[in-house]
Image: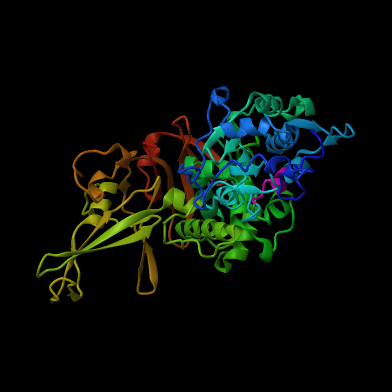
């Protein structure tokens, strides 16, 4: 691949055309009004989905007109540059410079690509969701900010190259367009992975084994860190969280703290500590390394100490509190990277795209019923987990459904409430229901009871179902019938063993093949399904059975 990887169309600057009027004169026939409409045609807010069959895409009148003009050759050069910078890079390949025949490192090429595909307006790298203008150096994101569309409306530059596929998008038509000459260039570069510039090095690649595919690794206990390792295993083996870390590039390519400290072994200090980067490096190690030795989470431990002073030291901590701490940091890190402190707060799940909200958030509806007029006042509270009281068993076997029944049952409040409808002051009743449900439901069983400045542990056994149907606990009609979207499957169980002051955490995880493993720090054991369901669980993680 050429060292001249930054195209003229990148945000790094540079004029697109030497002949300034060679392209502009072809646009005077395009009449677009101030609303972004051409002859009344509605411009969609986002691009059409990338087609699967590129050969079926026909040339629109606008690109035909341009390619029949004297701007044609300039378009070909610019298009080739943009497609070159957009092509996927594979770390198992060796890249050769066209200029001097020397090998170019993958990291160097990736850094150039990341810099080139940053949005000119918001300065964030949306990576595979960027549009490279064909007529100027602008690179625009095509997501929530939609700077590519805004650029078109302000400049009337009709064409942009999709960085995912190298296809040309026509804003005037509101769809992808193609041409045999452009497709020949695109196929040459992206269709075969740019093999003219690549030397395949078989030593750089080996088939992954089961250890790396299923992340069958434990954590070295660095001194009462079992609460951390248990929670990390629930995240590592959470399919939705895993997908977020490996497919959502927004944080990875925009956090200035990432490669310097966490990917290249740099020194972590308070001013550059980042929880998301630290957890991301753990994900990369677990799913790419075939070693079965325990992993030392020194980076995460150091970062956690900087972020939350109460975690500093080697005292046992509460696993649930650490889980809440990580989720809060995932949200805060996105705020920092996006440069938007005005993002929704952690307790507001509206429109936030962080790992916390997209995976765990849901809404809880509270209904207050007046004792005089029976009118109901409803409030909606955003949640990221359910904390359930353990029902008094009275020598009877109880399960999660008993705890949910208690949580959602109607209760008489011992307070005076002024009704908004009749104005009477009465002692109302209250009932909780699930207004919405998350992709992954986290449940805490309240096993630690705090009374009179002392803490005790509730050892009551609670039966754990492998499948959890939430239909009857959700707000809405027809709650007696099973809704497939409300059935959840158990995949992780965190248990606390021992007393309050001398306890230890272990976690049970189900892998993709349906097998259950017990993770006790660095020790991993295959266990039976019965071993899991009969344990005194503290934290439960259910994933929706119908995605």
The number of numbered discs placed on residues in the rendered structure image is 0
The quarter of the picture where the C terminus appears is top left
In this picture the colour scheme is rainbow
- Magenta range: 113-119
Question: Residue 269: percent from the left, percent from the top?
Answer: 70, 63
Q: Is residue 15 covered in magenta?
A: no
Residue nearest the viewer, comparing 111 with 347: 111
In this view, the residue farthest toward the left is: 372
Question: Residue 173: percent from the left, percent from the top?
Answer: 52, 37
**Residue at image location 45% in from the left, 57% down from the top:** 320
In this view, the residue farthest toward the right is: 100
Image vertical order of residue 90 relative to residue 264, above or below = above
Residue 302 can be seen in this image? yes
Question: Residue 289: percent from the left, percent from the top?
Answer: 65, 37
The quarter of the picture where the N terminus appears is top right
Query: In the rendered view, does 338 fall on the left or right side of 189?
Result: left
Query: In the rendered view, does 184 fall on the left or right side of 470?
Result: right
Q: Is residue 115 covered in magenta?
A: yes
Question: Residue 197: percent from the left, percent from the top?
Answer: 79, 29
Residue nearest the viewer, comparing 481 with 159: 159
Image vertical order of residue 418 relative to residue 177, above or below = below
**Residue at image location 54% in from the left, 23% down from the top:** 56
**Residue at image location 63% in from the left, 32% down from the top:** 65
Residue 447 can be seen in this image? no
Residue nearest the viewer, comparing 81 with 192: 81
In this view, the residue farthest toward the front is: 29
Q: Quadrant of residue 432?
A: bottom left
Query: In the rendered view, does 388 fall on the left or right side of 145?
Result: left
């Amino acid at each position: 691949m050429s060292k001249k990887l930054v195209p003229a169309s990148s945000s790094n600057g540079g004029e697109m055309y030497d002949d300034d009027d060679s392209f502009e004169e072809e646009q005077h026939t395009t009449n677009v009004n101030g609303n972004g409409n051409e002859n009344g045609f509605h411009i969609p807010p986002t691009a059409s989905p990338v087609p699967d069959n590129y050969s079926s895409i026909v040339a629109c009148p606008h690109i035909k007109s341009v390619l029949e003009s004297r701007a044609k050759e300039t378009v070909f050069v610019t298009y080739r540059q943009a497609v070159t910078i957009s092509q996927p890079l594979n770390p198992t390949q060796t890249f050769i410079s066209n200029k001097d025949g020397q090998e170019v490192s993958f990291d160097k090429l990736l850094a150039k690509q990341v810099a080139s595909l940053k949005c000119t307006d918001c300065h964030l790298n949306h990576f595979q969701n960027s549009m490279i203008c064909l007529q100027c150096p602008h690179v625009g994101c095509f997501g929530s900010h939609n700077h590519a569309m805004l650029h078109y409306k302000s400049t009337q530059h009709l064409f942009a190259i999709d960085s995912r596929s190298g296809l040309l998008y026509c804003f005037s038509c509101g769809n992808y367009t193609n041409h045999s000459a452009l497709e020949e260039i695109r196929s040459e570069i992206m269709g075969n992975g740019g093999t003219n510039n690549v030397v395949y090095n078989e030593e750089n690649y080996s088939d992954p084994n089961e250890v790396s595919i299923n992340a069958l690794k434990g954590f070295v206990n660095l001194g009462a860190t079992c609460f951390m390792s248990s929670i990390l295993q629930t995240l590592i083996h959470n399919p939705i969280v895993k997908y977020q870390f490996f497919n959502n590039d927004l944080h990875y390519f925009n956090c200035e703290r990432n490669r310097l400290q966490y990917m290249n072994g740099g020194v972590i200090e308070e001013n550059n500590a980042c929880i998301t980067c630290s957890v991301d490096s753990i994900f990369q190690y677990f799913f790419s390394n075939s070693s079965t030795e325990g992993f030392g989470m020194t980076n995460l431990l150091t970062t956690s100490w900087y972020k939350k002073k109460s975690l500093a030291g080697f005292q046992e901590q509460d696993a649930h509190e650490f889980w809440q701490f990580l989720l809060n940091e995932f949200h805060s890190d996105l705020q920092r990277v996006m440069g938007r402190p005005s993002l929704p707060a952690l307790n507001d799940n509206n429109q936030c795209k962080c790992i916390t909200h997209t995976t765990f958030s849901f809404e809880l509806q509270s209904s207050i019923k007046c004792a005089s007029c029976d009118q109901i006042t409803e409030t909606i509270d955003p949640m990221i987990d359910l904390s359930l009281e353990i029902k008094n068993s009275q020598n009877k076997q109880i399960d999660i459904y008993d705890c949910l029944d208690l949580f959602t049952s109607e209760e008489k409040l011992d307070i005076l409430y002024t009704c908004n409808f009749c104005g009477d002051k009465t002692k109302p009743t209250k009932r909780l229901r699930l207004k919405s449900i998350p992709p992954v439901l986290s449940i805490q069983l309240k096993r630690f009871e705090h009374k009179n400045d002392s803490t005790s542990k509730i050892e009551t056994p609670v039966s754990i179902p492998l499948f959890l149907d939430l239909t009857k606990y959700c707000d809405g009609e027809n709650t007696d019938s099973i809704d497939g979207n409300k059935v959840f499957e158990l995949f992780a169980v965190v248990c606390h063993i021992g007393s309050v002051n001398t306890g230890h955490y272990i976690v049970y995880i189900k892998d993709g093949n349906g097998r259950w493993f017990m993770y006790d720090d660095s020790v991993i054991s295959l266990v039976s399904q019965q071993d899991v369901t009969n344990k005194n669980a503290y934290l439960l993680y259910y994933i929706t059975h119908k995605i």
